[in-house]
Amino acid sequence: MPKINFNDYEIKGFYDEMFNDTHVVRPSYELFKKRLEKVSWNKLNFLQHSTDRAQLSLGMTFNVYSDNQGVERILHLDIIPRIVSGSDWDYLSKGLQQRIVALNLFINDIYNDQKVLKDKIIPKELVLSSASYLKECIGLKPPENVWSHISGTDLIRGGDGKFYVLEDNLRCPSGVSYMLENREILKRTFPEMFEQLNVRPVHDYSHYLRDMLESLTKVNKPSIVVLTPGIYNSAYFEHAYLAQQMGAELVEGGDLVVKGDFVYMMTTNGLQKVDVIYRRVDDEFIDPLVFNKDSLLGTPGLFNAYLKGNVVLVNAPGAGVADDKAVYAYIPRLIKYYLGEEALIPNIKTYICAEEEDCKYVVENIAELVVKQTDGSGGYGMLIGPHATKAEHNEFVKKIKNNPRNYIAQPMINLSRVPTLCDNSIEGRHVDLRPYILYGKEIKVIPGALTRVALKKGSLVVNSSQGGGSKDTWVLDNK
């Protein structure tokens, strides 16, 4: 049986996580490469097939809203892991903690004193015109003054080998269940490697999550629920998984009722008071009396119970203003303003179409840029200029001119690549990295992440809804 080898593996001028530009294996991958080269192609394909079956048996599926077939899919897990050195991770962890502290100070400021707007660190109209800025949250003080308790920050490594922040996810970040289940599957696939490589564990995430949620209330032994939009939501597997792992109840809006400004869950034994809600329902749908009056996903009176301090919502409503892709461009300034420090993990150069000079530059150079909707997510509403047609360029120019506030643009960054199993070959595929941060009375950066991989050859779009897959992320306990 032929064995695995990387003799024909092509770097193609990209930054490769496993090999340097002279095809020498990087230290963090040395042992893994040595072990993998003892495996036959038949064995490797069998392991990959077993992984796919394991995902199906665990119910690790998701829906794609743009797909009218209504078919649930697995988030394909490629069995070749992404390996991050301990020194790289420690640097990223410090940078992520710095960023989440500054972002929470910013959110708290704009809903209260608004000093950052008065000092003109960020344009007032840019913040107040954000679709995620909620006037209903003005004057709000959440527990510990923390607005985003659970965040997932998307990072990329560019062609220069440096890490950059691609975007922040401070509303209802998803994917952590895949990080956890990917790890369990890969531990069974390569059991001996975990001990030999000293991979940092992620299995205790659910315990940290529960502890963080409990820390946000003074109630002894609080009742915690996970609020889901329901089985048709693309991330329903994750909602159910996290509830089960935490020993919390999984509820929909109709399972809750507000009486006397307290929230109760309807059970077979009557009403049970709810103290903390980990919500996976977007702001506009949580309470039809305050936000979208047509919402069937929320609970009437929920927001008022929250304002009265009778229930904790995680993440806090209004936190999504810091997700706005136009606000993103100012985050290095916000870190300097609130913390007096330079950003440890830099942003990508960003052009804000709401600003006249930037808009002119974007329109004139659209063929070279990546254009994104400021309130977009999941890879939708995006143009990759170098890969788009002239007609698509013209269409986006019209969109930008009609609503410049709704768009930003960035130079195209060639994401780093990781070797990926492609039929009977191993080829480089582009990846990003989503670490998860828990913020209660203290900050905990989980020593692992969801690595998303663009499975289509040459593609830079890693989103699952756009055909992307995932990899387990191994953070080594070394320097």
Image (spheres, rainbow, N blue to C red):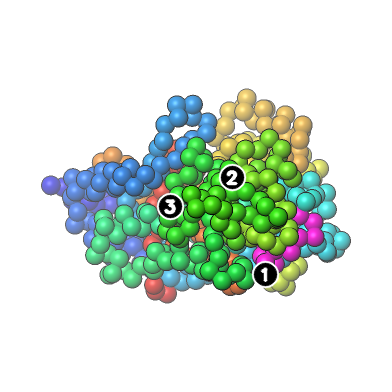
Q: Nearer the viewer, residue 308 or 8?
A: 308
Mark 3 crowdedness (10 Å alpha carbons): few <14, some 14-19, many ≥20: many
Quarter the C terminus occupies: bottom left
Question: Is 191 displayed left or right of 307 in the figure?
Answer: left
Answer whether residue 146 is magenta in the image: yes
Magenta stretch secondary structure, dominant? loop
Of badges 1 and 2, the one in the foreground is: 2
Instruction: Give the distance between the C-alpha atoms of the residues marked 1 and 2, in whole angstroms.
Output: 26 Å
Residue on which the image places disc 3: 241
| Numbered circle sitting on residue 253 | 2
In this rendering, the answer to whether 208 lies above or below 363 is below
Residue 361: tell me if it is visible: no
Residue 270: tell me if it is visible: yes
Q: Secondary structure at mark 1?
A: helix
Question: Is 175 displayed left or right of 332 in the figure?
Answer: left
Residue on which the image places disc 1: 144
In which quarter of the view is residue 424 placed? top left
Q: Answer whether labels 1 and 2 touch (C-beta < 8 Å).
A: no
**Magenta residues (range):** 137-147
Q: Amino acid at mark 1?
A: Glu
Question: Is 67 displayed left or right of 404 in the figure?
Answer: left
Instruction: Residue at 80%, 60% (x, y): give it.
Output: 139
